[in-house]
Amino acid sequence: MLKKIIVIGCAGLLIGIGINVFILPFHLLDGGVFGIGLLFNYLWGLKIGITITCLNIPIYLFAFKYDRSYFFNSLYATLFTSIMIDLLVPLIGMIHLPILISAAVGGLFIGLGSGLMLRHHTSPGGVDLLALIISKHFSINAGFIIFFIDALILASGLLIFKDGTLIYSLFTIIGVSLIVGILTSFRSVNVYFR
């Protein structure tokens, strides 16, 4: 249990850094609940972490019905990740990278955080949690499920943002999906902290 708490802490920190240092400075999007939280932040200035927590309520009700262990593990992960995202806002603008590199590195950080959580049967919530449940019951790779839903979120961003920065968001989403797909493809988690 202590190892899972440490993994959740490190993963939440990675996600918070990925969003605040690499995604927010360029108004990039991620997919899933993070992407919706980013959209709400860009449109109305809502805090991303609080938005993510609120959006996860119906998803958690679904998770509670299908798999209570994922529900309880992921509740802590979502709350911690949401807090980290909102606490690390002062990091915005601390690192100056070209937009393409920032999009890719942001995807790497978010993918590592989400993938580590999924490897330890927990999730930062949202699409990751749904993907984990669907993956478990239908033998579909969680990374593929996340990519499909993220593409829908990005498409909705096209209706709101008219500039070319959304194309760079695709690099973020691909990075997240690839890293999550790699980390969730292995059957044994012995490689990772167990």
Image (cartoon, rainbow, N blue to C red):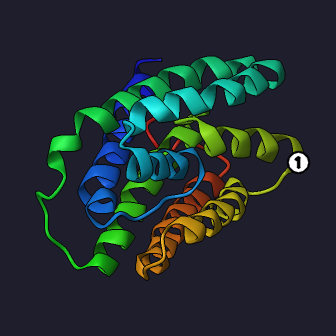
Q: Toward the viewer: 84 or 160?
A: 160
Residue 155: image x %, image y %?
64, 69
Quick check: 158 above or below 74?
A: below
Q: In this rendering, would 171 be left or right of 154?
A: left
Indicate the position of residue 141 as horizontal and vertical percent values.
74, 57
Judge whether residue 178 can be spotted in this image: no
Instruction: Give the side of residue 130 with respect to residue 111, left or right.
Output: right
Q: Position of residue 170 (x, y in %)?
A: 52, 74
- In the image, residue 90 sits, relative to residue 55, either above or below, namely below
| Label 1 Cα neighbours within 10 Å, binned few <14 / some 14-19 / many ≥20 | few
Residue type, mark 1 in image: Phe
Residue highlighted by disc 1: 138
Depicted 154 relative to depicted 49: above or below: below
Asked if residue 58 shows in the view, the reply is yes
Tell how many labels: 1
Instruction: Name which residue lies at 74% across and 21% down.
Output: 61
Task: Say which residue appears at 82% left-offset and 19% top-offset.
Answer: 65
Residue 136 in the figure: left or right of residue 159: right
Q: Closer to the camera, 41 or 28?
A: 41
Q: Nearer the viewer, residue 46 or 18?
A: 46
Residue extending furthest toward the right: 138
Seen at 39% across and 26% down, the residue is: 80
- Which of the two residues, 74 or 126, is positioned nearer the viewer here? 126
* Local SS, label 1: helix
Image coordinates for residue 8, horizontal then vertical, percent: 42, 31
Q: Residue at x 50, y 47 (%)?
A: 34
Say left or right for 131 vs 79. right
